[in-house]
Amino acid sequence: MSPSSSSSSSSLSLSVGIIGGGIGGLTTANALLRKGFTNVKVFDAAAKFLPTSGAGFGFSPNGQICLSSLGIQGYPEVVHPFHNLVRMNRDGQVRQESNVLKRMSDKHGFGIAGCLRADLIDLLKEPLMDVHTNNNNNNNNSVLKYSHRLSHIEQDKEKVSVQFENGLEETFDLVLGADGINSTVAEQLNIDHSPPIYSGANIFYGVIPTTTTATTTTNSNHPDGLVYKDFQNPLLNRRNSVMQGPGTGEVIFFRVGPEEREHLVWAVTYRSPAPPPKSAEWQPHQGDTTNSDQQQQQQEQMQRDALQMVLDQYPASHPIHEASAMTQADRLLHFGLFYRNHKRIWSKGRVCLMGDACHAVLPYAGQGANQAIEDAIVMANCLSNQFGPTEPQLKIEHAFQEFYKQRSKRTQRVVNLANFMDKLYHSENRLVHIFLDFFLTQLLRGGFIFKQIEKELIEECPIQDWDHYRPFRKMKLKVSCEAKKQ
């Protein structure tokens, strides 16, 4: 369903510029178009989407419900559903497991799944490209614009002007800054601007393709003609499971993506006095390419050396060794973990921040992308509620204040939870380890802690009539399963 099909009877001519073409920015564009806003553009600094950027993530019920409310129903076909939670000990052996995630999915119709960021980006881009086609392929009217790195932004009482490093300039009635934790929009307009806070931990993050299509030289080990990678450690062969345990911090393994493009994601965190140098992927705008190959090789070697220092702290039987050895250099990420103190101000005049630009969260809550999707839904609602037949003039600042009111407390809880988990995983205090053990035990048992998380993810989701979307989702999953059997 195209996002331009909306229940709103009026077509909103208000112009909206969105800085940042990630999950949050693209979802916001879809939500606004569905509400009837016809002049929406998304600008991203990269020349094109980098498929390894962000790699895979846990797509939770709140994110799925929000996309369903936009008519974006294709996500069940590009995710790997999680049924089991598996706890490992420090040696990488299974200590405890539970099907608590399957029980949640069976109960609510929405569960937690592994998703490749590239797949979700493609899903979000598709309806925006339809809007481009409806505009007669006029490139100036296309919704999504790459190679647009923001260089300057200023505003007055009437408009917002944005300038890009490619020399182009555009004006909008309002601008939304979905440009990440190092937001240029926040910095230039001084919207409660402060640098991100380094958590004192770094992460290695690897992605391994686990399925390929059978050819004349390979034999399929699956009815659908797929060839599955066979790992020596049985834990790495487990599907529909999230496997997590202690070590230098948190160690985690899970699958992402649809069966024909399935990948194993692994990650390990560790304490460090400083973050590693940023890799080229996280710095896509580098004009000097002199000796780039040599620098890349040096960077990869430094990364491998740093990884080996972490691996040396795990016994040889731990699955982290095999997973890291099977990871190609271009699918291995190494970066510092940062968060933001919760901003007291998210907007100024005709400009408002969203997502990581105002409430960046550490990965332990698995909510970065999901909260950005929620932001998009709430922002579109707040803007459309201020503009209609009885409101000839959009009250932009009122809409932004309402957005902050609806999102501030919820995102603060998520940020606090992630910071709390960071301290638990990286503490050297034995009593803290005992508490973490209790916390995770209760989680796997589906007790009070799990029920609170379940409530936060589903009952506190911005879409209150989420149950309305369950039948359609089950139908899609059933059709997908039946198609695979044929």
Image (tube, rainbow, N blue to C red):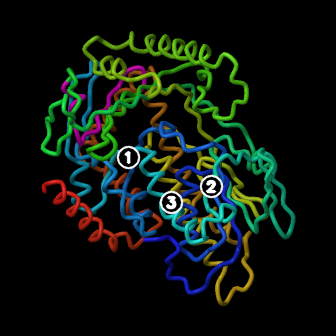
Q: Give coordinates of residue 18: x percent, y percent.
A: 66, 58
Relative to residue 287, is residue 4 drawn left or right? left
Instruction: State the residue position of label 3.
Output: 374
State the mark number for residue 354: 2
Note whether residue 179 is visible: yes
Instruction: State the residue position of label 1.
Output: 115
Q: Quick one: SS at disc 1?
A: strand
Q: Is residue 236 magenta?
A: yes
Q: CA distance from mark 3 to mark 1?
A: 17 Å
Note whether residue 435 is visible: no
Among the 4 quarters of the image, the one containing residue 268: top left
N-term mark: 3 or 2: 2
Q: Dot 3, crowdedness within 10 Å: few (<14), some or many (≥20)?
A: many
Region rendered in magenta: 234-249
Q: Dot 1, crowdedness within 10 Å: few (<14), some or many (≥20)?
A: many
- Three-letter code for the amino acid on which mark 2 is drawn: Met
Q: Quick one: SS at disc 3?
A: helix
Disc 3 to disc 1: CB gap under 8 Å: no
